[in-house]
Image (tube, rainbow, N blue to C red):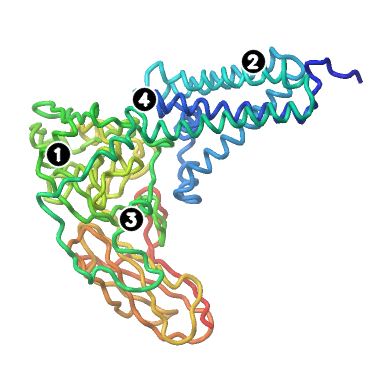
Amino acid sequence: MTEPSAPNQAGTRAWALAGIIAALTALAVGHLVAALFVPRASPLSAISDVVIAASPPDATEWAIATFGTADKPLLQAGIVAALLAFGAAAGLVWRRSPWPGLALVALLAAAGAAAALTRPDLGATAAVPSLAAGAWAAGSLHWWATRGTARTATDRRRFLIVTAGIGAAAFAASLAARRFGPGSAEADRDAFTVPEPDLPAADPGPGAELDVEGLGPWRTPNADFYRIDTAITPPNVEVDTWRLLVKGRVGTERTYTFDDLLGRELIERDITLCCVSNPIGGDLVDNARWTGVSLADLLAEADPDPHADQLVSRSSDGWTAGTPTAAVFDGRDALIAVGMNGQPLPVEHGWPARLVIPGLYGYVSATKWLTELELTTFDSYDPYWIQRGWGLPAPVHTASRIDTPHSGAAAGTVTVAGVAWAQHRGISAVELRVDDGEWTPCDLADAATDDTWRQWRTDVELGSGEHDLAVRATDGDGTVQTEERAPVKPSGATGLHNVTITVT
């Protein structure tokens, strides 16, 4: 077997490593270019968005049910792994002949550009980050081929380190640009202070929070609040250019700016949100204090058609939800929120404005990055998840969960505690059953509104061995939580939460 020519003196492992570093640093360069110009068009975000959009509904639902809020990071990790493998292959091909290697890099760059161009409202500039990434990868491999491979192993190692360092610097710069750069949503958010509400939330008092170890807080911190949506990269929405359009079956189309919202009566309310994908006993449910304006009052200014039974809300990334207009105008605190727990809405939770409508699952009521409200009918349009086989809007099921203990306890008096919710109906009672015994009432925390969950607790005497704990709630209408098991699709899971613990 003949030795490679001088430009290809490096071995296959060195070429594969060069291809991997070229691919990895190209991702960083693409991310930097995107952060400066079109954040949602970074190669990784664009490809991830296309994968999500093209995935069969069953695959998407399986990912959410299996991985919960980790589904997006795992998807991105898988795509990065595939890109690095592709980079290694490009390096090995380039070792034999530059042109086929260049063709592989160009193909990958074109795929990223095409993926970005499919994203709503991005325009032709969406292709630039992927093309820049491809140019960087090609330039890196060309540099490696003409200079890095002909030198000593030390020189080649230095080349790889320098290239990787440049990529790391580009990635760090992209994070800084997204956080602090011109048009940064985070910069806009940092400059905003949530005004004092005109209508403050009712104070539930200290009795809303039970002092039980292992029981989650009554009000969920922003950083811990669950996030389920289809956006790989949260949209970077500039406050100065943000507009909310009200259109469709209305007497007069209206457009609102962010300042228009702040000039209205500001309402503060405690409201629990729940994902329809939340399994029995799951954690895709949280409670927060929201600040915003009345959705009903704002829509009324457009003179809505009384026969328009669906309100379609659109996100800046094109996602849609369909809410019954009856649930907007029946007196509940349906809000266009700008604040969360006294702080500006986090970017990942919808900054600068989102919907919060109590009593309905998030897929039909909690649109983030809100840009459009359209009055229409259910016969005329099917929003995103309805197109994928999920049910039409229905009230959140009465549900309850055991937070503690999870698996074991010491014999004697054992404190069992958790939360229960039936938004817009409230919780009137919670009961616990141990093994096959009778249902016994639990103590309930205070609640100032029917739109939040309630903590509950009880003390039971347990001997050594395994014990099965089950919980059920009764809503404010007197309806007891059903024991009938149903999956999350199409309209939310039902059944009782059971926990088996070992008592020693």
Mark 2 is surrounded, within 10 Å at the Cα level, by few (under 14), some (14 to 19) or many (20 or more) other residues, namely some
Contact between marks 4 and 2 (CB within 8 A): the answer is no
Q: Nearer the viewer, residue 46 or 420?
A: 46
- Which one is earlier in the sequence, the residue at label 2 or at label 1? 2
Quickly name the residue at label 3: 221
Label 4 vs label 2: CA separation?
Answer: 28 Å
Dot 2 falls on a residue whose secondary structure is helix
Dot 3 falls on a residue whose secondary structure is loop
Label 2 vs label 1: CA separation?
Answer: 53 Å
Quickly name the residue at label 4: 120
Contact between marks 3 and 1 (CB within 8 A): the answer is no
- Which one is earlier in the sequence, the residue at label 4 or at label 1? 4
Check the image and report above or below for 234 versus 444.
above
Q: Amino acid at mark 3?
A: Pro
Q: Amino acid at mark 2?
A: Ala
Label 3 vs label 1: CA separation?
Answer: 24 Å
Q: Nearer the viewer, residue 402 or 279?
A: 402
Q: Quadrant of residue 282?
A: bottom left
Mark 4 is surrounded, within 10 Å at the Cα level, by few (under 14), some (14 to 19) or many (20 or more) other residues, namely few
Q: Position of residue 177 (x, y in %)?
A: 41, 31
Label 3 vs label 2: CA separation?
Answer: 49 Å
Quickly name the residue at label 2: 103
Q: Position of residue 405 (x, y in %)?
A: 44, 73
Q: Position of residue 171 (x, y in %)?
A: 51, 32
Residue at x 33% of width, y 37% of height:
186
Dot 4 falls on a residue whose secondary structure is loop
Q: Position of residue 235 (x, y in %)?
A: 35, 33
Contact between marks 4 and 1 (CB within 8 A): the answer is no
Q: Quadrant of residue 484?
A: bottom left
- Which one is earlier in the sequence, the residue at label 4 or at label 2? 2
